[in-house]
Image (cartoon, rainbow, N blue to C red):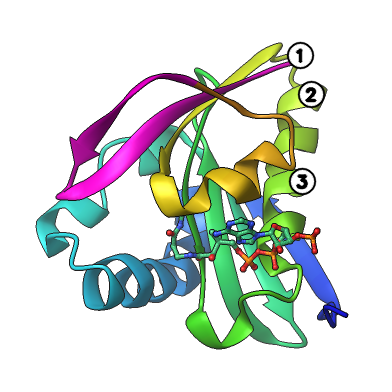
Amino acid sequence: MTVRAPTKVNLGDWAAFSEQATPIRFRVFVDEQGVPADMELDEFDDVSCHALAFVGDEPVGTGRLLPDGHVGRMAVLAAWRGRGVGAALLQGLIDEAVRRGMGRLVLSAQTHALGFYTRFGFVPEGEVYDEAGLPHQAMVRQR
Ligand SMILES: CC(C)(COP(=O)(O)OP(=O)(O)OC[C@H]1O[C@@H](n2cnc3c(N)ncnc32)[C@H](O)[C@@H]1OP(=O)(O)O)[C@@H](O)C(=O)NCCC(=O)NCCS
């Protein structure tokens, strides 16, 4: 049985969260997955709603919602995966999208994570493509 970590998810802007979210993203995407460091932070961070997950006082995961309904940069520290942290983050972003009246959410999923997003109602759309050297699949969630 999966042991769920008691996870708190906060939502906020980049000014408030960059200090804690940036190291998580660099550890997961740059160090672990080999994404080029200069691609990790981008112009969409400033306009996104960011989610930051905490277990106790420790920030362990992050993700973001763009104003156009794109969900992205979902990252949970390796030591905390498989304990419901990613689910709490994604649910927090979906709830915020619903609150904002967004009917359609889209994301570019790394193909290994298709099963994770499928659990939340996202369905694949189109062909697999390359992004930052990793295979990706567009997914859509219609409310
Ligand atoms: C993808 C990621 C965010 C998932 O976070 P997580 O905290 O491990 O996920 P959770 O423990 O909350 O899992 C929620 C559910 O999804 C399932 N799940 C998690 N990862 C999965 C995967 N890769 N494939 C299929 N199912 C998966 C879990 O089994 C769980 O199912 P359950 O509700 O039936 O128990 C995390 O693995 C991660 O950060 N990976 C590295 C970065 C990355 O690749 N991000 C995605 C970019 S598109």
Q: Crowding at label 3, few (<14), some or many (≥20) Cα neighbours within 10 Å?
A: some
Tell me whether the residue at label 1 lies in contact with that at label 2, contact meaning CB atoms closer than 8 angstroms: yes
Q: Give the residues drawn in magenta, as a range.
A: 125-143
Mark 3 to mark 1 CA distance (whole Å): 15 Å
Residue 128 drawn in magenta: yes
Direction from residue 115 to residue 119 in the image, left or right: right
Q: Position of residue 72 (x, y in %)?
A: 46, 42
User: Would you name the residue on which mark 3 appears?
Assistant: 91
Q: Crowding at label 1, few (<14), some or many (≥20) Cα neighbours within 10 Å?
A: few
Using the image, determine if residue 111 lies above or below residue 43. below
For badge 1, the amino acid type reads Gly
Tell me whether the residue at label 3 lies in contact with that at label 1, contact meaning CB atoms closer than 8 angstroms: no
Q: Position of residue 127 (x, y in %)?
A: 33, 22
For badge 2, the amino acid type reads Val
Direction from residue 59 to residue 11 in the image, left or right: right
Residue in the picture at 74% in, 20% down: 100
User: Would you name the residue on which mark 2 appears?
Assistant: 98
User: Would you name the residue on which mark 1 appears?
Assistant: 101
Mark 1 to mark 2 CA distance (whole Å): 5 Å
For badge 3, the amino acid type reads Gln
Residue in the picture at 24% in, 78% down: 31
- Quick one: quadrant of the N terminus? bottom right
